[in-house]
Structures are given as C-alpha cells and as structure tokens.
Image (spheres, rainbow, N blue to C red):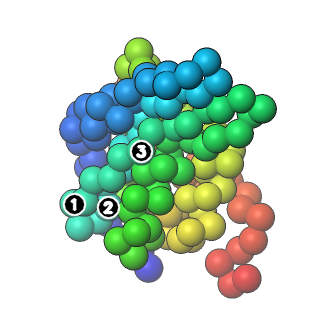
C-alpha cells in the first residue's frame, strides 16, 4: 500500500537520534550508542535506538534497535529514518539495515532516509534490487 510520505522535517528526528547516541562504554569490550537512530511512522510515532558493539564483532546497528522498538507496537511501515554517530555526524544505513527495512515491509521502499546533511533519498534508491519481489 502506498502512503504519502510528504515532506519530512528531519530536524526533530535528528535530535532524537542524537539523544539515542549515548556513547556509553560500560567496560572495555562494550560500546553502546556510538550511533543512535530515530524513525518516524506514518501515524507520527517516533522510535529511537542505540547500536551495541561488543568484542568479537557481535552487536547490532542503531537502526535495528529503533525498528525493534517500532515492531513492538505492531507497526511495520517507516515514513522516515536517520542515524547519527555520537559526534552528531549523519550516517547512511548499512546494507544489512537497508535489507531489514525492505524485508519487514515492502512498502518501506518509499521510506525517506537522511543520508547526509540536506540529502534525503528513498530506500529504493539505496537498495534498487531487492532479493525477493513483492509477489514472492
Ligand atoms: Zn546497519
């Protein structure tokens, strides 16, 4: 189902993502919130998440964390999303996060993503060839 994304004001989302980038190191092997993410749903909900980086390369991205928060509310469509590191620099989503957004809801191909200051693209521009089509 197509929903009108409209014009997205990323200033509030970017602030929320910065607040989630807590840059917390509880010990030498764990870094939480090196990156924070915030997403907005079509009903205006905002969900945030922090990345977790542990030794041996385990952990997950801030976008995954924000998406998990959204999914707890049985919502799958993302109108807009942004991620920033703890210094406030905007980061585009990694390939795994792009694929996650696509797989939880094919409609997220329309999701507006702030990939750099003043640069917004849709998920379909970042992930032009999904591994599976909508029809399966
Ligand atoms: Zn990622």
Quarter of the image with the N terminus in it = bottom left
Label 2: how many Cα within 10 Å (few below 14, some 14–19, many 20+) = some
Q: Position of residue 5 (x, y in %)?
A: 32, 59
Mark 1 or 3: the one toward you: 3
User: Residue under circle 2?
Assistant: 41
The answer to whether residue 119 is above or below residue 105 is above
How far apart in space, not on screen, are marks 1 and 3 (Cα)? 17 Å
Circle 3 sits on which residue?
49
Q: In terms of depth relative to the viewer, which is nearer, 41 or 37?
A: 37
Helix, strand or loop at disc 2?
A: loop
Q: CA distance from mark 2 to mark 3?
A: 14 Å
Using residue 124 as the reference point, say whether residue 83 is left or right of it.
left
Q: Which residue is mark 1?
A: 44
Quadrant that contains the C terminus: bottom right
Few, some or many residues within 10 Å of mark 1 (<14, 14–19, 20+)? few
Asked if the residues shown at circle 1 and circle 2 are in contact, with their CB atoms under 8 angstroms apart, the answer is yes
Q: Tell me the quarter of the picture where residue 73 sits.
A: bottom left
Which residue occupies 48% across, 50% down?
65
């Amino acid at each position: 189902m197509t929903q009108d994304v409209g014009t997205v004001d990323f200033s509030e989302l970017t602030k929320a993502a910065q607040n989630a980038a807590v840059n917390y190191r509880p010990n030498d092997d764990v870094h939480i919130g090196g990156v924070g993410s915030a997403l907005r749903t079509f009903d205006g909900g905002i969900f945030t998440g922090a990345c977790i980086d542990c030794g041996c390369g385990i952990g997950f991205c801030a976008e995954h964390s924000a998406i998990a928060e959204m999914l707890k509310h049985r919502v799958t469509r993302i109108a807009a999303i942004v991620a920033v590191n703890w210094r406030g620099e905007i980061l585009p989503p990694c390939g795994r996060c792009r694929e996650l957004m696509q797989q939880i809801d094919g409609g997220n191909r329309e999701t507006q993503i702030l990939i750099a200051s003043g640069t917004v693209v849709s998920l379909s521009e970042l992930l032009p060839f999904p591994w599976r089509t909508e029809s399966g």
